[in-house]
Image (spheres, rainbow, N blue to C red):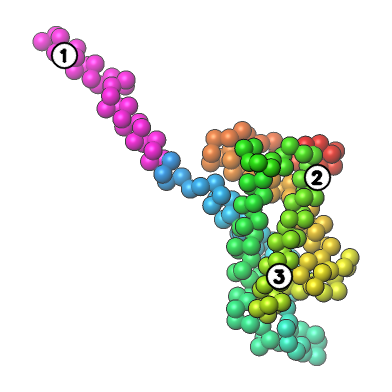
Amino acid sequence: MRVALARMGEGTTPDSAPVKALERTTTRARRFVKPKRTVVIATIMAVLGTNLEIIDRAALVDLKGHCVGPRDELGRCLRDSLSAGSLAGWSSLWMLPIYGFIGVILGLSNEAKSGFNVSKVPMIAQCFLSAIFILVIEYVTGWLLNLRLHFAIWDYTGMWGGDIDGQICTVNGVIFFFLCPLAYWLDDVIRFVGYNKKKPDGLLSYYVRLFTFRA
């Protein structure tokens, strides 16, 4: 009897096979329900970027896209000059996939195991390369959505510092440059919070690295 009880006790210890099997199943379930980091980054950057777009347009009193047709006597865009496909209001729904895609690419470039890891170069170079990349994406999407499909989502014609076909401008390039440390910090925070990676330093340290030319 004592031997039988002892064997039963052994079967209920934390090291028993059923417990280990349950732990493995739980671990797999957790991995299954955890979204991919690229999806999380795309969602956060899409929402953040679009909200920054709304704030920018609100500050410039420019909440209805840009004209491809006539303006009224005050220079305001007439409602019927906007294409329904622009999805424009305070911003445009097209900005969600655009900012999301940019966030994913910046996150992948910040990943240590990627072929080209920008975190190995000085922060100022990281931001410069990232700003150029963002401008390229902005021009390509602007050429398609605004110049070809005439959605009139944005138009930088006449902006200070110059522009290219009204789709990208110097001012936005400078803004993107100084927003890049924030994007890299958010990517590192997401890695730490959701994916057990190294805890990042504070946001201020990223800007210190930018102005002190450190990686």
Q: Residue at x 73, y 37 (%)?
A: 120
| 10 Å crowding of disc 1: few (<14), some (14-19), many (20+) | few
Residue 34 horizontal side relative to residue 197, left or right:
left
Residue 202 horizontal side relative to residue 18, left or right:
right
Q: Quadrant of residue 85?
A: bottom right
In space, the residues marked 1 and 2 are separated at their CA atoms by 68 Å
Residue 66 horizontal/vertical position (percent): 73, 78
Residue 178 horizontal side relative to residue 184, left or right:
right
Q: Residue at x 65, y 41 (%)?
A: 115
In the rendered structure, find residue 5 and report the number of the disc placed on it: 1
Q: Quadrant of residue 192?
A: top right
Question: In which quadrant of the rendered image does the C terminus lie?
Answer: top right
Q: Residue furthest front?
A: 115
In space, the residues marked 1 and 3 are separated at their CA atoms by 75 Å
Q: Which residue is mark 2?
A: 125
Q: Earlier in the sequence, mark 2 or mark 3?
A: 2
Give whichever of 190, 90 is nearer the camera. Answer: 190
| 10 Å crowding of disc 3: few (<14), some (14-19), many (20+) | many
Q: Is residue 188 above or below residue 166?
A: above
Q: Is residue 137 above or below residue 26?
A: below
Q: Residue furthest left?
A: 1
Q: Residue at x 67, y 49 (%)?
A: 106
Q: Which residue is mark 3?
A: 142
| 10 Å crowding of disc 2: few (<14), some (14-19), many (20+) | some
Q: Are marks 1 and 2 in contact (CB under 8 Å)?
A: no
Q: Which residues are magenta?
A: 1-30
**SS category of the residue bearing label 2:** helix
Give whichever of 131, 148 is nearer the camera. Answer: 148
Q: Amino acid at mark 2?
A: Ala
